[in-house]
Amino acid sequence: MTIDSGLEFFFVINIFYNKCNYSFLIGIILTLRNIRISYNIDQMRSLNYKQFVWLLLTLSALLILSSCASAPRPDYALKTRSGYVTASWYGPKFNGRPTSSGERFDMYAMTAAHKKLKFGTKLRVTNPENNKSVIVTVTDRGPFIRGRDLDLSYGAAKKIGLVEKGVGRVKIKRVGRDIRYVKRIPFIPDRTSGVVNIQVASFTDMSSAYRLKKGLEVKYKNVFITRAIIKREKYYRVKIGKFKRHEKALAVAKQLADEGYDVFIDTD
């Protein structure tokens, strides 16, 4: 009697239900066909041996499942299985103001705000009531009203017929990302610099600074705002800190830069 046929069956089921790491699973199946692990009836009567076999099968199952779990689905960041979210729109009040990504908000451009998606993420947004759709680029953080997931620009909302209704369910699908939004860290201080902060952005408009702070606090801790006067003009600097370990600050800064924030590490 052999046990590799049972393992082969388990791996085949994982291929069809998890759809991940195909080459790894198929390689194991082919290997098992060449290496036959057999045992006789006397060994079957040994409880310890049967326990060993079941332990081997359990560990194999956990290994495969953990391997599959490490490969996230393409739409994992949307945090929705159905693809449907609640959307609203924003326009005149914010037109011309800097967004959390640093760009000036254009209410007629095809853009959107999301609490967590990386800047530059492109979404196809469809209104299920009329089947109209539009592709928008995430350039801002929000909305910060409970129950809402996506803020469309006025122009995008108008294109799918959401302006008059104001708030409604839409279907979203991620269709790519504009890599121009991926940033790099321009300055990395020496490791002996002591306590450091990460500056995420600087605004002359206080409301924009607090809007970004609120967006960062969805994911990050110790977000604060400092004020500085340069040439008689007041600036509101949004920072994360203070980091005692340089390695931790650098890791967080790299993550923020990948999300699209134009960050740098300072020692203030």
Image (spheres, rainbow, N blue to C red):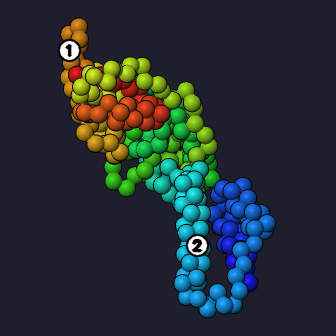
Residue at 43% x, 36% y is: 255
| Residue 66 placement, left or right of 105 | right
Q: Nearer the viewer, mark 2 or mark 1?
A: 2
| Residue 5 placement, left or right of 188 | right
What whole-number distance in Å separates the C-alpha atoms at marks 2 and 1?
Answer: 66 Å
Dot 2 or dot 1: first in sequence order is 2
Res. 153 in view:
no
Which residue is label 2 attached to? 56
Task: Please tell me in which quadrant of the rendered image residue 189 appears.
Answer: top left
On the image, the x and y values in percent for residue 120 come to: 52, 34
State the quadrant of the C terminus: top left
Task: Please tell me in which quadrant of the rendered image residue 151 appears.
Answer: top left
Viewer-closest of 50 and 141 = 50
Q: Check the image and report above or below for 67 versus 51.
A: above
Residue at 48% x, 55% y is: 79
Which residue is label 1 attached to? 229
**Extreme-top residue of the structure:** 231
Whether pointer 2 and pointer 1 mark residues with C-beta atoms closer than 8 Å, the reply is no
Mark 1 is on which residue type?
A: Ile
Residue at 34% x, 36% y is: 248
On the image, the x and y values in percent for residue 30 come to: 77, 63
The crowd level at tag 2 (other Cα within 10 Å; few <14, some 14-19, many 20+) is few
On the image, the x and y values in percent for residue 171 come to: 56, 54
